[in-house]
Image (cartoon, grey):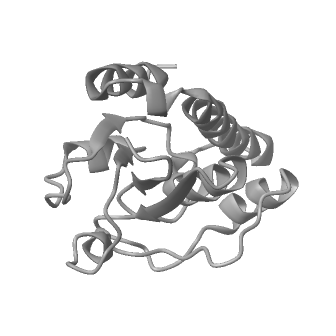
Amino acid sequence: MPTHHNVLFLCTGNSARSIMAEALLNHKSNGAFTAYSAGSHPSGKVRPEAIQQLELAGVSTTGLRSKSWDEFAAPDAPTMDFVFTVCDNAASEVCPVWPGHPVTAHWGVADPVAAKGDAEAIARAWHDAFSQLDRRISLFTALPISTLERMSIQKEVEKIGKL
C-alpha cells in the first residue's frame, strides 16, 4: 500500500461522529492519512457539541462541514484507501461504489445526538463517543499498514471496530 492514505468516515447525518473522526484522524496522523467525512443524508450543519469535544482536546475544527457522500463518489474525488461507517444506519445503507476497492469496516459508535437525560448524562454521551473514536483512531494510526497484506489490514480494522 502507499505511504499516504485517504480515509472516509460515514454516518447518516455527518454532523457529529463522522465529523469528530475526520478531525481526530487528521490531527493524529502526522500526515500519513487525510481524513474526510460524509453522510448519506447530511444535516447540513456540524453539531456544536462535536466542535466542543474537539476543541477541548486541542483538535482543529477549521474547515469541518456536513457534506454528502456523493462528493466522494464523483469522478474527481480523492480515491479512498479506507472507508469506515461509524453509525449503524450508514452501515446498513447501500453505499456508493468507491473506486479502488478500499478497505472497509464498521466502527459503530452510539449516537450522542440521541442521548436522553439530564445535562450530565448528555455530556457523558458526547464524551464517550469522542473517547471511543479517539481510542480507535489511535489504534488505527499505530497499525504497520505498509508492512501488512490487504487481508491482514482488513482483519485489523474490523477488530478495532469491535473495541
Place of residue 143 in the rendered image (x, y in percent of width and height, measured from the top left): 54, 27
Place of residue 136 in the rendered image (x, y in percent of width and height, measured from the top left): 58, 31
Along the horizontal axis of the image, is 110 left or right of 91? Answer: right
- Residue at x 29%, y 50% (from the top left corner): 90
- Residue at x 29%, y 29% (from the top left corner): 150
Which of the pair 18/149 is nearer the observer?
149
Quadrant holding the N terminus: top left
Q: How many marks?
A: 0
Place of residue 95 in the rendered image (x, y in percent of width and height, measured from the top left): 18, 55
The answer to whether 162 is drawn above or below residue 84 in the figure is: above
- Residue at x 73%, y 41% (from the top left corner): 127
The answer to whether 137 is drawn above or below residue 62 in the figure is: above
Along the horizontal axis of the image, is 15 left or right of 77? Answer: right
Along the horizontal axis of the image, is 148 left or right of 90? Answer: right
Place of residue 9 in the rendered image (x, y in percent of width and height, measured from the top left): 43, 53
Name which quarter of the figure residue 51 lies in: bottom right
- Residue at x 48%, y 74% (from the top left corner): 66
